Image: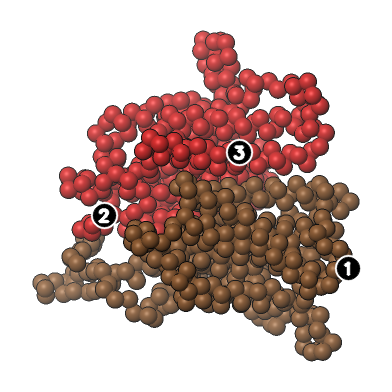
Amino acid sequence: MAMTETTATGLRVPFTLRVEPRLEVPRWLGAVTSAGALILAFVIGGGIIALAGGDPIRSYQHIFKAAFGSVGVLNDTLVKATPLILVGLACALAFRMRLWNIGAEGQFFLGAWGASAVVLIPLLPKTAPRPLMLLVMALAGFACGALWAWLPGYLRARLNVNEVVTTLMMNYIAVSWVLYWVFGAWSEGGFQMSPVFPKNAWLPRLTDYAGAVEAFAGLTLHLGFLFGLIAAVLVWFILQRSRWGYEIRLIGDNPRAAHYAGVNMVRNTVLVMMLSGGLAGLAGMSEIAGVVHRLQGAISPGYGFTGIIVAWLAKLNPFAVVLVSVLFGGLILAGREIQPSGVPRMLQGVILFCVIASDVLLRYRVRIVRRGAE
Amino acid sequence: MIDWIIVLQAGVATGTVLLFATVGEILAERSGVMNLGVEGMMLIGAMTAYKTAVLIGQPWLGVLFAMLAAGALSLLHALVTISFQADQVVSGLATNFMGIGLSLVLGEGLSKAGTVALLPSYTVPILSSIPIIGPIFFTNHSVMVYVGYLLTPAVWFYINRTRPGLHLRAVGEYPAAADALGINVYRLRYQYVFVGGVLAGLAGATISLAVSPGWFSELTTSGQGWIAIGLVIFAQWDPWRALAGAYMFGAVRRLILDLQGPQTLLGLANPFYYMPKLGFFLQMLPYALVILILFIGSREAMRKRIGAPAALGTPYVRGERG
């Protein structure tokens, strides 16, 4: 491969910076550049906070304390991380195939709606045994998220319709759909929220077992977190250890080769999109049954979009998704209190920029060459 | 009764926002760079324009700063995708997050700013007295609407009939050949991504200083940047089709409001009046319509074998095989 020289310095120094493609990428480099990008993002974000008239050091101290400072807030951080893990996995799975599911937010809403429908229509009687109730709710949430993702997947597979735009449009439609039910048939006394679910539709929380383990008192971490961990293992297994995952990765890396190898593009596109949507739907179910315990308009501070950043920062690695989700869970938790209110959103944007910009270091390396030493 | 003239007139006014954003994205995509950050760039534009009008009292300066601010944000996308060869989809999303977050941070408290000086509106003499066309296109419109009338043919002519326009198309269709002819692929792509950002900023300024004045945080744009991206595909990268699509979507937005007003519709009881919650289905309409036109557009594209600029979405690396 020819060396590309893209020096843009007009400086007269005895050295020149030479940018050349890497032939091999060391295993540790991805983690190092991600961490470096994260640090850089916080420095840039601090600069912007200072420009907007805030105190960056105090803001960050506040964020850290409010997110990881005690067992109580750590619990809250993990609660916030739970939907992010599932949504992040949903994005990571689709992105691995270079299928741009930007609709996790809408699939999350539909999952929440599906789980609520089990309780509110009701599909199961109020007295149904708790495990059965929760199982059916989880299945309904998964199924609704998957069905919501089916249309963009099908249009992409059959007609090559840009899935970025369609999945995004489905987000807006999903929110209107949920609002229609929340304001209408499921409204409690005219308020824009459904009645509280009966207790057997609540996911078990740590605090429910405070009688047995005293330290659990007040901890609201719920079973949805375990869903996230199990899903991480499953997604890892599918991608790395199964034949299907091999096909997904092949399509992602080289769709033409995959096509010639006889991989069924249409089926894989639709299935991956639906599994991705299903995971996002399960996140909606877990949030509804584990935290909110009712359906209402405001159930997500943009989890579906944060999931995109989570997936990318984790380099689409399912286990890294869990770690990054905890970090972002803390950011969302602490972000509710800091002013101005757009800071967490802005930081997410800065982080994503730094991460994708740092990827260039994985493909190229910069060497300092003495002039005339070639 | 619904006054169709008013619906169409409002459609032209609100459609102008979509027109600017769509034409900007068309120029960027024609050069081979997709920028999904339109929504964020529009929001930055809307915030900057409004904030300038509040602080300095000069709406035209607001428009200028809005264009520069959104242009600056788009250069970040250009840097990451063109120089660093990052994925355009992900970088576009980052542009979007960045634009939304920045405008929320810098626009803090702006919604309570009170009244500000807005862009002027004009009625064109003589032309406005033409029946139907006059009231729809030439009566009491913001100056931006007229800018839109001039921009569309100008951009069409530029792309299809000028030498720089030929270079633009070459860079988007076959950058290696353009490079071999001595056209600087990188520089042109930077330029058109910047122009796309500038026009998205203009679209944002048109919202906050003309069409629906004020700052309502994210609701200021309410997904119009994404609709613009859908419109680019529907328009098949042609400014005239973009104009038609933009005005149509503008009219739909107005129609949604008007449908909920009257007690009777076509002589029947208006369901949207008597059951306001059905209004949520009306609100889905523009977004569902985007999916529908993409569906129709892609079938047409498949049949006629037309499509996106060939190099759209792929970074150009000199010396690498395309």
Q: Are marks 3 and 2 on the same chain?
A: yes
Colour of chain B, in one word, is red
Q: Which residue is mark 2?
A: B322
Q: CA distance from mark 3 to mark 2?
A: 37 Å
| Viewer-proximal residue among B97 and A82 | A82
Subunit of label 3: B
| Viewer-proximal residue among A130 and A84 | A130
Most extreme residue toward the front is A262
Marks 2/1 in contact by CB < 8 Å: the verdict is: no
- Any idea which chain is the brown one in this picture? A
Mark 2 lies on a secondary structure that is loop
Q: Residues within 10 Å of mark 3 (few under 14, many from 20)?
A: many
> Residue A296: percent from the left, percent from the top?
76, 56
x 71%, y 67%: residue: A138
Image quarter in which the C terminus of chain B is found: bottom left
Q: Which residue is mark 1?
A: A127
- Identify the disc placed on residue B286: 3
x 52%, y 33%: residue: B246
- Decide: is A67 above or below A263: below
Q: Upstream in the sequence, badge 3 or badge 2? A: 3
Q: Residues within 10 Å of mark 2 (few under 14, many from 20)?
A: few
Q: Is residue B237 visible?
A: no
> Residue A54: percent from the left, percent from the top?
58, 64
- Decide: is A137 above or below B22: below
| Residue type of the residue flagged with mark 1 | Thr
Q: CA distance from mark 1 to mark 3?
A: 42 Å
Mark 3 lies on a secondary structure that is helix
Subunit of label 1: A
| Residue type of the residue flagged with mark 3 | Pro
Q: CA distance from mark 2 to mark 1?
A: 63 Å
Subunit of label 2: B
Q: Are marks 2 and 1 on the same chain?
A: no
